[in-house]
Image (cartoon, rainbow, N blue to C red):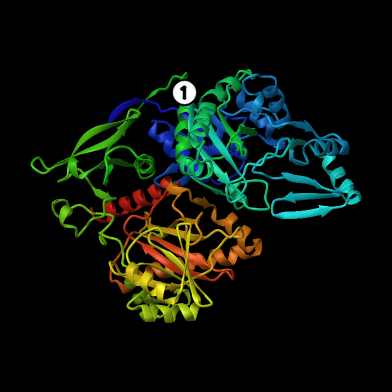
């Protein structure tokens, strides 16, 4: 038993009752900082006795617990019905978040400043119908939006074309003659709105986008840039919000793709804005602002425009990154309180990640945070960190707010290995796996990429999933492939082994010609030319030929759906994510590192297949994914712990298998979700192998 100061208690006050993934990320980040964490909502507060009946995260589950008031509260904005509760708590407890005023107030502040007034879009408050006509007269195209709106709700695009007025709201496009338009805008006047000049911030594909700069106060109250990322909307839409079917991408490839000559200059300006604007902006207030979300548009000339400033920015798809910074700030606010001495026991399960690369990564940090859910100690090591002579591993673990090297005996001090190398069966790694084979590994099979055709063949033979298998053949001769093309008209041809659409070609038979599309290039060949082309292509590696499934968004962009499943704490299959991935080339999806987008499953399906279709497609996708996973284990007589399955969905909502990835499915933007499942499964293995 050791003695320690009582840990600071960080409270998270939200309006919803059940903790979400952001709350879990906050709880684990607080634990990394040696703080306790309590989640609660206004109904859990007992003002009379100064107690809170909140939720604490214990061994991966939320447990109800009565607690004293926390040392600091990470709060969401109050509602009208509980403002008095907030006010009473704030008398004795520091809050992290404070309102900054509506859009009109923020713009008024900025337009007076020489350094930032050039970012402000011309605007005015909407107080009469004449305000709209005045702005249309000046700019022809305008935006009307609520002064206090969020998530893109209530944003309207209005354009005057002759005597007609076009109004776009979400995916609705309406046309009004002047009499009906007057009736329409009279309703807007009664609401709290502002009018802005419309700024054309669109991709090369004419999709609307903005750049979100997410900044927060962190350690010692210093500002940090958490993330800068593009948010891409849909055609016939004026917002780019994820919850409404939008997508996100990585900032550098996105800028390279859309602003080839100016991308470096623009990126530097965005970073400068993220560093300097929060410091300047907070000077306008007599309290500390804890976080800001700056929404930046970029016009065709590369000029930056400030769309909005948000004081309560969301962190969907990067919860752990945002909450690690947020909890540092919360701990800083709580640090002025004195904490009593308590005793604790440090006898924990040790989970070691076998990593292919040195250095930190988001997954490693997320795994350390997730380990606290299961009362486990986490470290990571590479092949170079193994000392065979001394029988030790020099692992990296996190303590006292920093990563340090710690020596572990691999004879008796490591309980389970989370294998990220996954090279069982490879000669280069044979000694490692044999030396450590007395320790349970999370990954037991498949040290290389799966052969697509072998997987297709086994499922085809079995027959139980035939409705979801795309018609295909092995490419064995030009004549058979020509017959297949003539039967299906549109096909794709891809290597039997490979990832993320590498080497994939779209081929279409039109009259007596064959059109080939690949990486933005297009060929049109006659029959003899095509035979020569395909024989050259397939001379060095094996290919599979598939019927082309028209899996495209409403904006005619190719997409697939990545379903990522992992075994969790109870050894049951759990869904990590169902992720739409959208391409910028005609024939295939594009990795994010080269400019592709990802979206949110529910919003994506509702937008592209209709609100009413989501429930059925979601249910079917989950069932098919589990069926394919379990059938794979049965057909290949193996037990796997993780799989990424790629699906196509045609225009009728029919789901088809594209590929299965068992070695190392990607996890860009959801590292924390992967870590929770991986550490849970590792904890399960440690318990059943005691």
Nearest the viewer among 473 and 681 is: 473
> How many numbered circles are shown?
1
Q: Which residue is mark 1?
A: 332
| Residue 86 percent coordinates (x, y) | 64, 30
Q: Residue at x 50, y 76 (%)?
A: 489
Q: Can residue 649 be seen in the rendering of this structure?
A: yes
Q: Is residue 338 left or right of residue 353?
A: right
Nearest the viewer among 671 and 125 is: 125
Q: Is residue 161 left or right of residue 113?
A: right
Nearest the viewer among 574 and 256 is: 256
Q: Can residue 69 be seen in the rendering of this structure?
A: no
Q: Secondary structure at mark 1?
A: helix
Q: Residue at x 41, y 72 (%)?
A: 529
Quadrant of the rendered image containing residue 544: bottom left
- Residue 531, placed above or below residue 194: below
Nearest the viewer among 536 and 563 is: 536
| Residue 52 percent coordinates (x, y) | 55, 35
Question: How dense is the environment of label 1, judged by Cα within 10 Å: few (below 14), some, or many (20 and up)?
Answer: some
- Residue 118, placed above or below residue 512: above
Q: Quadrant of the N terminus?
A: top left
| Residue 374 percent coordinates (x, y) | 36, 45
Q: Is residue 136 left or right of residue 434?
A: right
Residue sticking out furthest to the right: 179
Q: Is residue 690 left or right of residue 596?
A: left
| Residue 676 percent coordinates (x, y) | 40, 48
Q: Residue at x 73, y 40 (%)?
A: 145
Residue sticking out furthest to the left: 389
């Amino acid at each position: 038993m050791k003695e320690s100061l009582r840990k600071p208690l960080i409270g998270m006050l939200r309006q919803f009752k059940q903790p979400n993934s952001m709350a879990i990320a906050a709880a684990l980040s607080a634990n990394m900082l040696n703080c306790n964490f309590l989640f609660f909502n206004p109904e859990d507060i007992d003002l009379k006795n100064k107690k809170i009946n909140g939720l604490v995260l214990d061994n991966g589950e939320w447990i109800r617990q009565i607690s004293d008031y926390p040392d600091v509260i990470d709060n969401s904005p109050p509602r009208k019905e509980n403002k008095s509760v907030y006010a009473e708590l704030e008398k004795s407890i520091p809050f992290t978040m404070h309102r900054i005023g509506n859009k009109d107030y923020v713009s008024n502040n900025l337009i007076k400043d020489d350094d930032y007034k050039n970012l402000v879009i011309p605007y005015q408050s909407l107080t009469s119908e004449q305000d709209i006509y005045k702005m249309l007269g000046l700019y022809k195209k305008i935006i009307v939006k609520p002064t206090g709106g969020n998530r893109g709700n209530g944003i309207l695009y209005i354009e005057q074309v002759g005597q007609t007025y076009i109004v776009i709201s979400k995916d609705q496009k309406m046309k009004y003659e002047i009499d009906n338009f007057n009736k329409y805008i009279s309703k807007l006047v009664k609401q709290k709105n502002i009018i802005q000049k419309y700024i054309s911030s669109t991709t090369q594909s004419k999709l609307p986008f903005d750049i979100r700069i997410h900044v927060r106060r962190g350690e010692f109250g210093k500002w940090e840039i958490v993330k800068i990322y593009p948010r891409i909307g849909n055609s016939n839409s004026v917002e780019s919000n994820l919850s409404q079917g939008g997508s996100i991408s990585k900032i550098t490839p996105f800028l390279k793709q859309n602003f080839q000559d100016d991308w470096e200059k623009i990126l530097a300006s965005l970073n400068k804005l993220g560093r300097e604007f929060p410091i300047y902006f907070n000077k306008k207030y007599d309290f500390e602002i804890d976080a800001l979300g700056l929404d930046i548009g970029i016009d065709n000339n590369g000029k930056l425009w400030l769309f909005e400033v948000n004081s309560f920015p969301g962190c969907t798809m990067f919860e752990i990154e945002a909450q690690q910074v947020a909890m540092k700030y919360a701990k800083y606010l709580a640090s002025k309180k004195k904490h009593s001495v308590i005793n604790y026991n440090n006898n924990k399960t040790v989970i070691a990640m076998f990593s292919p690369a040195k250095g930190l990564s988001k997954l490693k940090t997320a795994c350390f945070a997730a380990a606290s859910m299961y009362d486990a100690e986490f470290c990571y090591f590479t092949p170079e960190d193994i000392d065979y002579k001394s029988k030790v591993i020099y692992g990296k673990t996190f303590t006292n707010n920093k990563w340090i090297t710690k020596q572990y005996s691999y004879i008796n001090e490591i309980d389970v290995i989370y294998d990220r190398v996954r090279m069982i069966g490879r000669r280069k790694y044979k000694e490692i796996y044999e030396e450590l084979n007395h320790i349970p590994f999370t990954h037991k099979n498949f040290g290389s990429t799966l052969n697509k055709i072998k997987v297709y063949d086994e499922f085809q033979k079995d027959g139980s999933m035939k409705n979801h298998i795309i018609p295909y053949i092995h490419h064995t001769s030009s004549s058979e492939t020509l017959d297949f093309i003539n039967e299906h008209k549109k096909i794709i041809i891809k290597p039997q082994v490979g990832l993320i659409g590498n080497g994939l070609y779209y081929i279409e038979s039109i009259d007596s010609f064959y059109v080939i599309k690949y990486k933005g290039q297009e060929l049109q060949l006659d029959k003899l030319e095509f035979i020569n082309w395909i024989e050259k292509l397939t001379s060095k590696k094996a290919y599979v030929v598939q019927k082309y499934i028209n899996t495209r968004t409403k904006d005619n962009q190719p997409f697939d759906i990545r379903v990522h499943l992992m075994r969790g704490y109870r050894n049951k299959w759990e869904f990590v994510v169902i992720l739409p991935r959208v391409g910028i080339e005609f024939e295939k999806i594009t990795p994010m590192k080269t400019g592709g987008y990802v979206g949110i499953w529910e919003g994506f399906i509702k937008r592209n297949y209709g609100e009413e279709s989501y429930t059925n497609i979601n249910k079917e996708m989950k069932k098919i994914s589990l069926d394919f996973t379990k059938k794979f284990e049965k057909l290949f007589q193996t037990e796997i712990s993780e799989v990424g399955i790629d699906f196509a969905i045609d225009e009728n909502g029919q789901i088809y298998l594209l590929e299965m990835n068992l070695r190392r499915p990607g996890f860009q933007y959801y590292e924390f979700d992967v870590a929770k499942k991986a550490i849970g499964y590792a904890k399960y293995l440690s318990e059943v192998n005691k």
